[in-house]
Image (cartoon, rainbow, N blue to C red):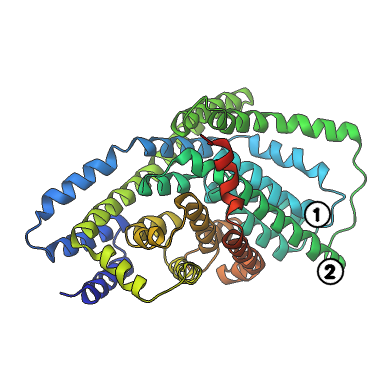
Amino acid sequence: MGVFELSLLLIVMMFAALALGLWIAFSLSLVALVALASKPAIPAAQVMATSLWSSSISWDLTALPMFIWMGEILFRSRLSENMFAGISPFVRRIPGRLAHVNVLGCAVFAAVSGSSAATTATVGKISLPELQKRGYDDRLAIGSLAGSGTLGLLIPPSIILIVYGAAVEESIARLFVAGVIPGLVLATLFMGYVALWALLNPSKMPPPDERTSWSHKLSAVRELLPVAMLILGVIGSIYGGIASPTEAAVVGVALSLVLARAQGALDWTRFKDGLMAATVTSCMIAFILAGADILTTAMGFTGLPRQLATWIGELGLSPMMLLAALTLLFIMLGCFLDGISMVVLTTAVIMPLVSAAGFDLVWFGIYLVIVVEMAQITPPVGFNLFVIQGLTGRDLFEIARATLPFFLLMAIMVIILAIFPDVALWLPRTMFAG
């Protein structure tokens, strides 16, 4: 069977398996089995067993369940409410006023969560009722929440960067550092849009709030101290060289438990619920990664990625044209798959192309996360859209329309990253020099 026939067969099988509702890990393993069957001399069972074992003992992935558990603890504590109360007094005089709380709240929570869904749900539960009660435009509130919630994937610690780093054997610490400036730039773009919208639509904004006293602002700063301590403990331990990302995840869990308990927000029931939710999510992701590793190994034995890379190389696409093609591919995949599945499904095939085009793997990881962020708000399988639908009860496509401006801002961010790669590479190059 030729390379194109085999590729077409595997693609059709993958979509058919997903359409039939087969678990993603099983779909990946089934496709891998068919790929190995095309090479009768390869012991398929031994290859699959070895790949399954090797994927399950990766030390880099130890951080994954810890960061997920940390997000679940925060989701069930009052730290998120304190964050909203601490930010709001400082944005009352900016065009857009409290609508900026969605962006700033998501950016801050992303720095201690690592999950887009956890960031969106936690901030949304607090901000949407408050914004609605104060008369803010529903579409702006929903759109800014859905767009800003994706910052949980980019601003470290990021679960998807851990997955990508493990898949391509790249330093997770470098990836975390590389995500800082792009995350801040993207948050600035979101805030700029909110301010511009408010200036262009003054009739849809509520009356200005009363001027906030300095004593109120100082009180608000105190509300932010627990969150600041958590960020300092997690991110500071990584950047300061005190702890690896895996060890920092444990620090984050310990600090989250201490702070939640100190606030009286952690009882035995919440502890069990958070631990069980983190276990379920971690097992799901680990299972998907195991299937992806099996498929990656199978692809290596068939030589399909190398042949595809050769074929695309013969097309003579420039690096920018290749990047544009990959962007369209990921946006289309985002209509059907969640972010982590997109990364693990495509890594085996696209990484030879990326390496051949001369892209830095750290830079490409940040680019990939931003494109995956775009996929988080594309129907019909945009996870952030599902989260907001659960919070508001609104129609999924109505939420998607409200999110469209933020989708376009992410597309602009991809262009900025392509034109100025140092946006992602300058900080890790500086911090890890020598």
- Which residue bears the numbered disc 2? 200
Left or right of 254? Residue 31 is left
Query: Could you tell me which quadrant the N terminus lies in?
Result: bottom left
- Which residue bears the numbered disc 1? 134
Does dot 1 land on a helix, a strand or a loop?
loop
Mark 2 or 1: the one toward you: 2
Against 380, residue 242 (above or below) is above
Label 2: few (<14), some (14–19) or many (≥20) C-alpha neighbours in 10 Å: few
* Sequence order check, earlier mark of 2 and 1: 1
Q: Give the image location of residue 391, x and y in percent.
A: 60, 55
Left or right of 423? Residue 371 is left
Residue 232 is tagged as: none
Res. 156 visible in picture: no
Does dot 2 land on a helix, a strand or a loop?
helix
Which residue is drawn at the image coordinates 80% and 54% (left, top)? 134
The answer to the question of whether label 2 and label 1 lie on touching residues, with beta carbons closer than 8 A, is no
Total residue callouts: 2
Left or right of 220? Residue 189 is left
Res. 274 visible in picture: yes
Image quadrant in which you'd find residue 37: bottom left
Left or right of 78? Residue 326 is left
Q: Give the image location of residue 140, x and y in percent.
A: 72, 63
Q: Amino acid at mark 2?
A: Leu
Q: Nearer the viewer, residue 81 or 29?
A: 29
Against 119, residue 140 (above or below) is below
Which residue is drawn at the image coordinates 83% and 66% (left, top)? 204
Q: CA distance from mark 2 to mark 1?
A: 19 Å
Q: Give the image location of residue 244, x and y in percent.
A: 46, 30
Q: Nearer the viewer, residue 359 or 157?
A: 359
Q: Amino acid at mark 1?
A: Arg
